[in-house]
Amino acid sequence: MKLEIKNINLLSVVFSVYPLVLFVLSFLNAVFAIGDLSDYTLMQKIMQIVLWTLAQTLTLTVVSLALVFVYNLLCSFGIRGIRFDIEEAGVESEAVEETSAR
């Protein structure tokens, strides 16, 4: 079965788990980068982690939305979308049975 993605809804990108995953990854990135801030107090480090996390999450979300918008625009001009060739499970199991029977 062939599957082609021609249009990605922008609201589904914003209101899905995707921004939450970006937030968690940005938080981990900020926590691991905090070692460079040895002169700061604990409260300043916490504020820096929060601000870095929010800034990086917002930046990555906006860049993702821009890329999805460009993808949708190119697909609307007639350029082919991302294609997947998916084999059905029944066809694969029949092929395995035929080769084992020989």
Image (tube, grey):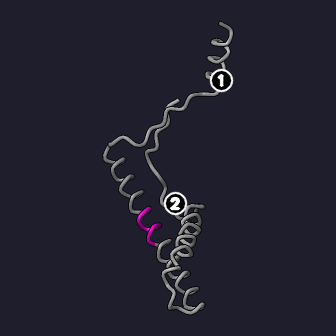
Which element is circle 1 on?
A: helix
Task: Tell me where residue 83 sits by quadrant.
Answer: top left
Which element is circle 2 on?
A: helix
Q: Left of 70 or right of it: where is 21? A: right
Compared to residue 57, the image places residue 96 above or below, namely above
**Residue placed most toward the observer, 57 or 2:** 57
Residue 90 tag number = 1
Task: Tell me where residue 64 sits by quadrant.
Answer: bottom left
Say what amino acid the circle numbered 1 marks: Gly
Q: Measure how far apart labels 1 and 2 are at the Cα level.
A: 33 Å
Q: Position of residue 28 (x, y in %)?
A: 57, 70
Residue 58 tag number = none
Mark with earlier residue (1, 2)? 2
Q: Position of residue 38 (x, y in %)?
A: 51, 87
Q: Left of 91 or right of it: where is 8? A: left
**Residue placed most toward the observer, 42 or 51:** 42
Q: Can you name the residue that lies furthest to the top here?
A: 102
Q: Left of 85 or right of it: where is 71? A: left
Compared to residue 72, the image places residue 30 above or below, namely below
Q: Which residues are magenta?
A: 59-65
Q: Is residue 81 magenta?
A: no
Q: Left of 99 or right of it: where is 68? A: left
Compared to residue 40, the image places residue 10 above or below, namely above
Q: Can you name the residue that lies furthest to the left here?
A: 77
Say what amino acid the circle numbered 2 marks: Val
Which residue is found at the position 43% from the left and 68% from the top? 62
Which residue is found at the position 52% from the left and 60% from the top? 13
The secondary structure making up most of the magenta span is: helix
Q: How crowded is the residue under tag 1: few (<14 C-alpha within 10 Å), some, or many (20+)?
A: few
Judge depth for marks 1 and 2 and give the one in front: 1
